[in-house]
Image (cartoon, grey):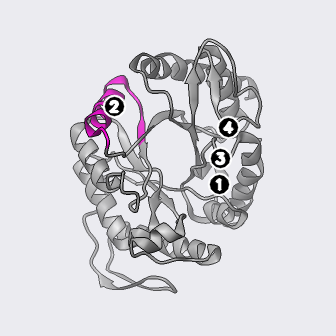
Amino acid sequence: MADYGHELEFGYFVDPGTDDPQRTLELASMFDEFGYDLIGIQDHPYQQKHFDTLALIGYILGQTERVRVFPDVANLPLRPPAMLAKTASTLDVLSNGRFELGLGAGAFWEAIRAIGGPVREPADALAALREGTEIIRAFWGGDALRYRGEFYEIAGLQPGPMPAHDIGIWFGVLGPRAMRLTGEIADGWIPSMGRIPPAECVWRNALIDEAAHAAGRDPAAIRRIYNIGGDVSPVIESGGDDSDTEIVGPRDHWVDVLTRLTVDHGFSTFILRSVTTAPKLRMFIEEIAPAVKDRVAEVRAARG
């Protein structure tokens, strides 16, 4: 159990579906207006009912002024790392520093094969993730780039443009070896509560911290981001213990659960999904989020 002391942030998981693009843009503008910190968008290029995530992110950044946007998470097997680095820095410059990079090693391999991507065994997928991260960081470093790895080769690339801010690379990975890689080289970790409840995050966070120490890093350098689902409702139905996969209950219940996830499990960024009505979305960011910040500040002060 750990609290890494990060400032709290709150975001929303926007659906990239093609059924109602106007609604998607309306939601993005709403989050920008209401004061949400982040918008996360899943990246499944092989899904025929999804827009391309990076193109959609670019459009949303162009329609908003303050909110930051990130792929939750980018599909590395279908996003060559040097091109992904260039796209990321381009979006970051054009949005005045409002792009972050969630990055995944890949999943749904037959769908990736169908669209022309490589199919990788788990060990190879992680090795490619390491190489891809090294290339992306080197690209953003600005020097001429040469790289020869098992999966990627760069032969004298002149990088540019440079990002407008220090873009975070947040891994969306799950297994033990992936947790260790996160601790070694990532800026953040993004699990989803619907798949990995809080109880299962404990040992994963411990592996991240152990690997960070072994690499000479402070575990607090790695932000913990949680995709969370549920509903704001009059009756508490879930979220009362660490085995729950969603949060359902009234305002104060949400405050209790998110405070516990921060001070006991180390999460400091919460990406909301499922809640869809404007009044509840406004309540979440204008009432629940500030109350969580206040409660966390009280706990941190009491703990010294």
Q: How far apart are marks 4 and 3 (CA)?
A: 7 Å
Residue 14 versus residue 153: which sits nearer the camera? 14
Q: Which of marks 1 and 2 is nearer the N terminus?
A: 2
Q: Which residue in the structure is indicated by mark 1?
A: 218
Cβ–Cβ under 8 Å for marks 4 and 2: no
Please name which of the two marks, 1 or 2, marks the residue nearer to the observer. Answer: 2
| x 47%, y 67%: residue | 111
Please name which of the two marks, 1 or 4, marks the residue nearer to the observer. Answer: 4
How many neighbours does mark 2 have within 10 angstroms: few (below 14), some (14-19), or many (20 or more)?
many
| Whether residue 259 is situated above or below residue 67 in the rendered picture | above
Q: How far apart are marks 1 and 2 (CA)?
A: 36 Å
Where is residue 297 shown, x and y percent of the image? 62, 24
Q: In the image, which residues are magenta?
A: 19-39
Q: Which of marks 1 and 4 is nearer the N terminus?
A: 1
Query: Is residue 79 rendered magenta in the image?
Result: no
Q: How far apart are marks 3 and 2 (CA)?
A: 25 Å
Please name which of the two marks, 1 or 3, marks the residue nearer to the observer. Answer: 3
Q: Which residue in the structure is indicated by mark 3?
A: 195
Residue 26 versus residue 294: which sits nearer the camera? 26
Residue 105 is at least partly visible in this image: no
| Numbered tag placed on residue 245 in the rendering | 4
**Looking at the picture, which amino acid does disc 1 mark?**
Asp
Q: Tell me: 273 left or right of 300.
A: left
Q: Is mark 2 on a helix, strand or loop?
A: helix
Q: Quadrant of the N terminus?
A: top right
Q: Is mark 4 on a helix, strand or loop?
A: loop
Q: Which of marks 4 and 3 is nearer the N terminus?
A: 3
Q: Which residue in the structure is indicated by mark 2?
A: 27
Q: Which residue lies furthest to the top in this view?
A: 234
Q: Tell me: 97 left or right of 252.
A: left
Q: Which of marks 4 and 2 is nearer the N terminus?
A: 2
Q: Earlier in the sequence, mark 3 or mark 2?
A: 2
